[in-house]
Image (tube, rainbow, N blue to C red):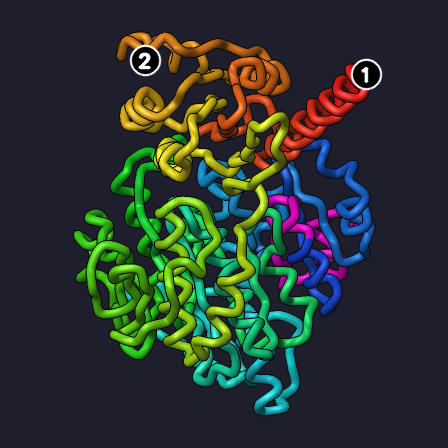
Amino acid sequence: MRNINKNDKQQSPSDVIAIIGLGRVGTLVAKYLLQIGSFISVYDEKAQVFQDNVVRQIIQHPNCFVLNDKNVRAMLNQIKFAVCSPGISPQNKVIKIFERKNIPVIDEIDFTSLEINRSALHLRHSSSRKSIMTLNQKSSLSGNDLRLLDIGEKRLLSPTIRRTKLVAITGTNGKSTTTVLLGKILRATGKKTFYGGNLAPGLPFAQALFEPLKYYYVIEVSSFQLERSFYFHPQIAILLNITADHLNRHQTLKRYQEIKFRIFAQQVAKDYAIINAEDNTIMTYIDKVPSRVVYFSRFRKVNGAYLYGSNLYFQGEKICSRNVIKLPGDHYLDCVLAAIAAAKILKVSNESIVKVLKKFRGIEHRLEYVRTIKGVKYINNSMCTNPTAGIAGLNAFTEPIILIAGGAEKKLNVKDYIDAIVNRAKWTVLMGENQKRLAEMLKAKNYFKFSLADSLEEAVRLAKDKAVEGDLILFSPGFASYDAFRDFQERGHMFKTIVNKINSESNSTSKYEK
């Protein structure tokens, strides 16, 4: 680790890349930059982060500077650009300082995609590779067959030749399932495929920097990532749906919608946009899409992928029967149709698509079957972090439902979710910081079939006591996890641990009774 001394030229190189946020994304970018010989400065507003073993290794490197609120201004003249983790708020004080000094702040998806494109060009031209790109608004990259394009007030660094295929997927709900499904389909073709990004559990896009070049990259991107993306250019961009979410960060629904549409911002006429034909919000902005539009719909025939009768089609060609799909709930058909549309654009055979669909049963924490105890099914839907996903979860099953719901608010309208609970839940256990608010809303609907829990374990046990054989206990919070957990993954793992504990107790009781 170097000490910052603005009067020491040797210790203050002129090409420093700042890393803001040292979570799983920031640490990968930092390690990559140090590996290729770059100078970096690192910042995280959480002091405990610097006790992590990986972070400690990074800051002990001689090419690494540690930034803090007191010394950041001393480094401003040396910092060329910053790579920011998606979870860092735009209101962060260091980001504000960089912006006032016109230091570009980009997301990891920008950085990683440009580096991968540069690697592909290097293989094609065998030109000497520089240690790192220089992202600024005054000069282009030299020696790598890149050109500088003017895009409104922004300037875009873009490769003239592509050797890889980049597919990006966003939407309020369903993007993780679509990412994994499409990744598996493309991998089934035999071509090297990386899939990840915002996906959790999964690999951040920056992990691809440490792997051999792939033919396909399938990347889930969130609104937090798109908010700071200015260079990200997928040849195929999928927008699944838009409903209100993350308004605690984006403030207004209009702003959230605009950010989601940034997935198309750098596309050109020869690229593809795959869009949900049944999403009125998306269709309102359809004229802003610069690329070729392909639709998907589970309600009617469209120019793209659709469900008609009991079969799935693409451009009039039958792909498979609906019975092939193992995922619960009609809403998952949107994910399947979007994945089919992308696969067919990439000229994947129906055989490869169907082979994966027959085996694909979803991903962890998304309507995940845990086990059946005494005739009662337990379903983990911890990824359900907004009311729209909560409604979809309730509608995915035909069995009587004992619902476990509640968590941290994100300034979202929950009226429709309350209506769905009243109509679909046999009993509801409320937990989390907003449980009392939800209880009052349910009582206003003359729904009194609920109880309150102080912990997740208490909630699961209350649900178990209300369930009878043939019922389904659905853990589908409908809200964020950070009121009591690190993230939705920790919350989901905790739910499964409790269910397995109950199963062990049940087995012990059964043996004793015998």
In the rendered image, the vertical position of residue 181 relative to residue 255, given as above or below: below
Circle 2 — which element?
helix
Amino acid at dot 2: Met
Q: Residue at x 65, y 27 (%)?
A: 499
Amino acid at dot 1: Tyr
What residue is disc 2 on?
441
* For the residues bearing labels 1 and 2, Cβ distance under 8 angstroms: no
Q: Give the range drawn in magenta.
A: 1-27
Could you tell whether 507 is left or right of 424 in the image? right
Badge 2 crowding class, 10 Å Cα cut-off, few under 14, some 14 to 19, many 20 or more, is: some
- Identify which residue, 155 or 514, lies in the foreground: 514
Q: In which quarter of the image is residue 155?
A: bottom left
Circle 1 — which element?
helix
- Identify which residue, 310 or 209, lies in the foreground: 310
Q: Which residue is drawn at 31% across and 71% down?
A: 314
Residue 71 in sight from this viewpoint? no
Tell me which label, 1 or 2, sits earlier in the chain.
2
- Identify which residue, 188 or 192, lies in the foreground: 188
As measured in the structure, the alpha-carbon distance from the residue carrying label 1 to the one carrying label 2 is 44 Å
Give how far across and how far down residue 42 sits, in percent. 66, 48
Residue 41 in sight from this viewpoint? yes
Give me the disc on residue 422. none
In magenta stretch: residue 336: no
Quarter placement of the C terminus: top right
Give how far across and how far down residue 110 sits, in percent. 49, 62
In magenta stretch: residue 11: yes
What residue is disc 1 on?
512
Could you tell whether 237 is left or right of 94 in the image? left
Q: In which quarter of the image is residue 315?
A: bottom left
Q: Which of marks 1 and 2 is in front?
A: 1
